[in-house]
Each structure stands twice: as structure tokens, then as C-alpha cells.
Amino acid sequence: MAGGGAQRAMVRLARGFAEAGHSVEALVLEEDGNFKEELSDKVKLTKLGPKRISGAILALARYLRRERPDAILVTEPACNVAVIAAKLLAGGSTRVLIREGLFPSVAATESPHRATRLAYRLAPFFYRYADVIVALASDLAKDLAKWAHLDLARITVIPINPVVTPELLAYAELTPKHPWFHDQLPVILGVGRLDRQKDFQTLIQAFERLRNQRPCRLMIIGEGPLRGELELLKAKSSFGSDIELPGFVSNPFCFMSKCSVFVLSSRYEGLPNALIEALASGASVVATNCPSGPSEIVDGDRYGRLVPVGDPDAMAQAIRDTLDRPANSSQSKARGLEFTIARSSSLYLNALFPQRPVS
């Protein structure tokens, strides 16, 4: 029950399925985690037993033979491979839907997780046995088809993550206690895990270029393995006092709603929840045109500005332009509100059970 955007999406899809009247069970390796409180009380929580994914295959196969569920939905490559392997061992008629949220051609080499890199090497052998294959963006679907040797027609694109909740919108209405949000200086905001994928180094470089020209501040919310490296960049910067790394915060949405510009600086993504959350909070956004998701979320340049990956000059210019010409907050919110639990869960149910369409 711990993790990031993929795990949060599964918890929320389970909630959506249950609210649609389905019997839902969440299978986990660990019961504790930051998403346990978000799990609907309508969803049964079951711990499989083994803590490692590889060790869970036999336990899951036994579960499938015993319980014979109509369908099982799984995300992230290592889990995808494990569930397919368990289904092959168990036999039966359970439909397996795998959800792919990263560009395989990129994540297979750049992911910091050994299990992810290994799973992508196994994907061409296992993914073909899934009943339903979902990609979060059309470009991602093409990359997955090429990587896993799949017919592109077998892949269903569902570019709607279950992100926006009433709780998110309520939290966005609050005002941060941080003093930076109580004066007139613009605040540039980044939110995400402090790792290579999110590329906050480029965001800091872009901020320095912008700060050379006008007063502003940069806040990057999140934790991760590159905290030390980012702290060093801050210490070396001529504008270090205008850069803050507050770590994890329980309510990033109020920061999103009150910031001057939200920036997604990632090298690669699937369908980045943070960008959707920022839009739903009413923020003006700048995002890298990385593979994949941002271009589909902002619909070209309709709801934000896109810049090349790893280009601090272009990023600084886009932030500058956004400060001078902010987005219409109501339009940003309306775009974000398209990514609801109800809409996303209905799309997944239709993919799983096309003979029983959900409106």
C-alpha cells in the first residue's frame, strides 16, 4: 500500500469499481503504506504473504485457482509479468488486464529499479498472454507494441487517470502556511520524487536563468535519492536562498493552487498525475514534452506550455512567458476535472468487459 502514482491509481480505481457496484479485492504484498487510509471500506484488503514479487507468483496462482475472480487488474512491469506468470500456472478464465505507464524503451535502461529493468526484458515473452493491455498514452502504446512485439491493435489507450477527487479539490482551496505564499514574489513549483526521472536539476538551472532577470522563488516538494545532489546545487547557486526543498508535504495541492507556475521537468513519464493535479488545482503549467503524457494532458499547448526535455533555456523562457501571461484558472480546472475516478474506472471496466459497457 506504499508507492507513487501507479499505486495511488490502483487504489482509486478499486474505489471506482466498488462504487460502481462491483465486488473488489485489493491484493498486496505489504498492508502498511501511505495509501492504506485512502482505500475504500468497500474494498477487501488481502495480503498475499511473500514480500517479494517473485515469491508471490505461487501464492497468487493458488489464490486464482481458489477464488476464480472474473478479472484481475495490475500495473507496473514487474507486477505485470508476475500476474501473467501466475495466471499461466493457475489456468482458468480470469481475465488479466495489465496497465503500462512508462515508455519501455526508456525505462528499461533508465529506471533505478532492477526489477523494472528485468521485467521489461521479459515483457516480450509474457505480455502477449494478457487478455487486455492498457497504455496511458498513444505514443506509449506505439513504444510498447514495438518493445514487446505486440500488434498495436491489441493495446487499448486510456489517457484518463483516476486523479481528481473531492478531497483534492477541498485541499486545493486551503492556503499554505509557508511565508512565501503570503507576499507578492512569484513562486515556481515542482512536485515529485527527487530522482533522475523527474530531472529537477534542469528545473533549478532554468530557475537560475530566470532569477537573473527577475525576482522569484523556486520550491521543489518531494523526497528521493537525489536530495543530496539537489541540496548541493542549491548551495552552489547564487540564488540558494530563493530555492527551497521542504521534503514531503501532506497537502501539495494548496501549494499548486497558490503557485505562480507549476513545472513538470521530467525526462520520461506515463501520464503524470502531478501535472493533472496542478491543472485541477487551477495552476498555470509548464511541462517537458517527454515520452509520454504531458502533450496529451495539456492538449498541445492549449492548457500549458511544452518545452524540450533537458533544455533549461527553453524552460526558463516558458516560465517567463507564463508569468507574463498566466493561464485561465477556470479553464485549467475544467481540464483537470476530466480526470475523475468515475470516468477512469468506467473506461477500465469497458476494456475488461466490452460485452457489458459502462456509461
Image (tube, rainbow, N blue to C red):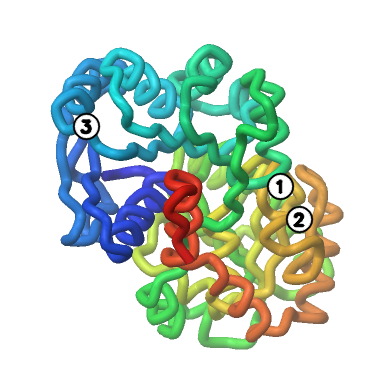
- Which tag, 3 or 1, sits closer to the chain's start? 3
Sequence order check, earlier mark of 3 and 2: 3
> Callout 2: 10 Å neighbours few (<14), some, many (20+)?
many
Residue of label 2: 206
The alpha-carbon separation of the residues under discs 3 and 2 comes to 53 Å
Whether the residues at callouts 3 and 1 have beta carbons within 8 Å, the answer is: no
* Occupied quadrant, residue 305: bottom right
Q: Mark 3 — residue? A: 68
Q: Is residue 310 left or right of residue 16?
A: right
Where does residue 262 sit, x and y in percent of width and height? 63, 67
339 lies above or below 291? below
Q: Are marks 2 and 1 in contact (CB under 8 Å)?
A: yes
Query: Would residue 214 appear left or right of 26 to someone viewing this image?
Result: right
Contact (Cβ within 8 Å) of mark 3 with mark 2:
no
Q: Amino acid at mark 3?
A: Arg
Identify which amino acid the numbered label 1 is placed on. Thr
Front disc: 3 or 2: 3
Q: Whole-percent x and y of residue 245?
A: 50, 57
Residue drawn where x is 37% and y is 54% of the image: 13
Residue matched to label 1: 202
Describe residue 302's horizontal placement relative to residue 177 as left or right: right
Q: Quadrant of residue 248?
A: bottom left
Q: CA distance from mark 2 to mark 1?
A: 6 Å
Count of all numbered marks drawn on residues in the image:
3
Query: As shown in the figure, which amino acid type bears the numbered disc 2?
Result: Ala
Quadrant of the snapshot with the N terminus: top left
